[in-house]
Structures are given as C-alpha cells and as structure tokens.
Amino acid sequence: MRRAVLAAAVLLPAVLTSGCGGADDGTVLRVLAASSLAGPFEQIAEEFERTHEGVDVQLSTGGSTDLVAQVQEGAPADVLATADTTTMEVAVADGLTDGEPRTFATNVLQLAVPPGNPAGVTGLADLADPARDVALVVCAPEVPCGAAAQRVAGAEGVTLAPVSEERSVGDVLGKVVSGEADAGLVYVTDVRAAGDAVEGIELPEAADVVNDYPVAALADADEPDLAQELVDLVLGDLGRQVLRDAGFGAP
C-alpha cells in the first residue's frame, strides 16, 4: 500500500497522508515531514509499525513552511521534520517542540530536467539567459528549497526568472515530470527518487549551500512517548541507512 502511495507522490506531489490502518484500528502517530522526505519516511514508518503492534503511523508531507503553519494552527501532530533549520526555529520559538530539535540529514540542490534535456540546460547561467528562454520552476523563497535556490543563485551572481514558484519541492518536480517546465531546482534526493522520469544536472556551486534537516517531537503530541521513539529511530542506525540510500548526506 505504501509503495503505491509513494509512486503517486512523484507524479502528483501534494500533502500525502498514508497509514496501514484507520484511526479506529489502534494508536495513531501523526508525522509531518518535508516533501523531500516522503520516500525514506515511508520506509521508517513501515519499520516503526512493524515493531509497534497496533500503531498506525500517518505521514503527511508538504512544504516545510506549510507544515509548521499547520502545527501553529493546532493541527494534530506528534513529530515534525523540516528541510531546513529556519522553519524549525519558528516552531521552537512558538514553543511547539518538545525539547531541542536534532539534525538528522543534509541535502543539496540539483537541476532536474525532462528526459533528453530538450532545452539543453547545462547550468545556472542558462537559466538566467533571456535568449535561452528556459521555463524554470523553483520553490517559493519562504520554502527551504526556494531559500537555497536564492542563495545558490546569489553566490554565482545569477538572477533567476522562474515561470512559477511552488510551495514544495515535490510540486517543482511535478512540473518537470509533466513537461510543464524545462528545468526545476530540486534536491539531489528528488532527482534520485524520480528515477527515469527526469535527468539530473549537478550544480558545483550548490555544494556550498547545504540544507540541514531537523526533527523533533511536538509539545502537544497525543503520543509523546511514541513520538520520541520515532525520532530516535530516525536518528538511529536504521534511519541513517534509509536516508543514505535515498541520497541524503550525514548531518
């Protein structure tokens, strides 16, 4: 069941809710995670359910800024994992986390282009060249992948002119997969997860713009003990292996 939902998430990036059972089947553990974490967190959720009989992990993914806003507005959640420290710091400042968040992974940007790279994109300079007229899609500036895109472009002295700014990196990837964009700035892990649906173009300058991913149990968690156990699983050997396999860097 989880695999089918995950495959759909690549083509239709949106807030994803999954779980093997319903709320009436047992204990529900609600996890909010950045879009780029969908694949590995699905695997981590499966392992957690396997070792915690009667627990249904419900995973929702989306833009980190939107996830924090959901928690601020009182949405029920037990665990939060974001794609940068800036968005997590908002949750901490509002007293929404239980204890100090821990960094569990890192990620960097890469250009995603449709198979065959029809626009012939080779790097950031092509994206900023009006004569090339490349249809670029990026994340909105307030979203972690968008903030990273701005830092990368700024470091290279390049001004990007995207045709759209999306609320999550999954939405950016979806535009490229559907052929609505010639290129999209996403994470290395998103390109890997998309498989043959896109091609990746490395950006040497992105190596200096690294996003740290923090995770924390939430202060109003309905299942605080289980929330901390899931956080420990993410930080532990299995979590590190799953994240490494997905292309994430170590913290």
Image: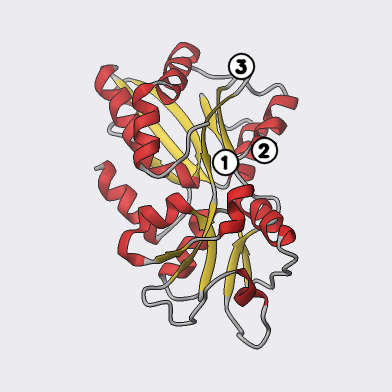
Residue at 66%, 24% (x, y): give it: 96
Judge left or right: residue 124 versus residue 230.
Answer: right
Mark 2 / mark 3, whichever is N-terminal: 2
In the picture of the structure, the residue carrying the numbered disc 1 is 83
Q: Position of residue 244 (x, y in %)?
A: 38, 37
Q: Is residue 57 above or below residue 222?
A: below
SS at circle 3: loop
Q: Amino acid at mark 1?
A: Ala
Q: Nearer the viewer, residue 153 or 21?
A: 153
Quarter of the image where one finds residue 245: top left
Please name the residue that numbered disc 2 is placed on.
Answer: 87
Q: CA distance from mark 2 to mark 1?
A: 8 Å
The amino acid pointed to by label 3 is Asp
Q: Residues within 10 Å of mark 2 (few under 14, many from 20)?
A: many
- Pick whichever, 109 or 3, lies toward us: 109
Q: Disc 2 versus disc 3: distance between alpha carbons?
A: 16 Å
Q: Which residue is mark 3?
A: 98
Mark 1 / mark 3, whichever is N-terminal: 1
Left or right: where 154 falls relative to 24: right
